[in-house]
Amino acid sequence: MREKFPVSVEKKVCSKCGVEKSSKDFYKDPYHKDGLYSQCKTCRADALRLKRKTHPEECRRINRESGKRWRTKYPERYKRYKDSYKSRNEEKISEQQRSRLQKLRLEVLGHYCDGKISCSCCGESNPRFLTLDHKNNDGNVKRKEANLGSGWQTYAWIKRNDYPDDLQVLCMNCNFGKAQNGGVCPHKDGEN
């Protein structure tokens, strides 16, 4: 961006703190005659920090809108930036995705267990052994209707669709046993 007014001063008084500072302590602003913002960098940072603290939703909204405008205006630059970031941070991105998906999975399981995550049949509580089960044994049909795979897609769909009532949490053993035993967990029919 071409400057309308070049920086024309060596020192300036901050309009907020009243301290005379070097022109390097002010951000450039092409719309002021001296080419600098009226507040120093420190005061401006404090004001922005306060605004983010007192109006977090508004700041997030403004940042999202600004980012969207930039990505629309400069799609090639955005693609280069995104590709470069991904290549430099593959491990970090993978870990963030794993963490986010684990959090989503635990949130969904917790919803169906009223907060205490465990198998509704045998009481197994290790989350790594737990899965979702369709009470009516129609999971395959439901996934096809919703065009879902398995895993995170299913958990995201469940959350987006307000946690349908036809699901329960079972451990893998109870779920597999139910599938092999005509829709009844072997724990419940008394067979060993």
Image (spheres, rainbow, N blue to C red):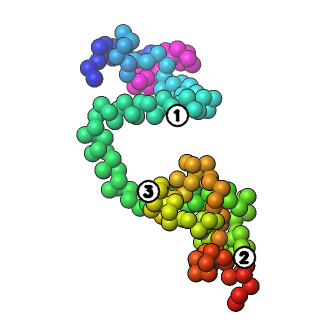
Three-letter residue code for mark 2: Cys
Span of residues in magenta:
13-27
The residue that label 2 is drawn on is 122
Q: Which mark is residue 147?
A: 3
Q: Which-is-in-front pick, marks 3 and 1? A: 3
Amino acid beneath label 1 = Arg
The answer to whether residue 183 is seen in the rendering is yes
Callout 2: helix, strand or loop? loop
Label 1: state its secondary structure.
Answer: helix
Q: Which numbered disc flags the more N-terminal residue, 2 or 1? A: 1
- Residue 58: where, in percent of width, then height? 55, 28
Q: Is residue 20 magenta?
A: yes
* Image-based side of 56 in relation to 32, left or right: right
Residue in the foreground of this view, choosing between 62 and 10: 62
- The picture places residue 185, in percent across and down from the top left corner, at 67, 78
C-alpha distance separating marks 3 and 2: 31 Å
Q: Give the residue displayed 69% in from the left and 71% down from the top.
A: 119
Q: Position of residue 63 (x, y in %)?
A: 47, 32
Label 2 neighbour load within 10 Å: few <14, some 14-19, many 20+: some
Relative depth, front residue between 66 and 51: 66
Which residue is under mark 1?
A: 60
Residue at 32%, 33% (x, y): give it.
72
Mark 3 vs mark 2: give the one in front.
3
Marks 3 and 1, the one that precedes in the sequence: 1
Based on the picture, tell me whether residue 179 belongs to the magenta stretch.
no
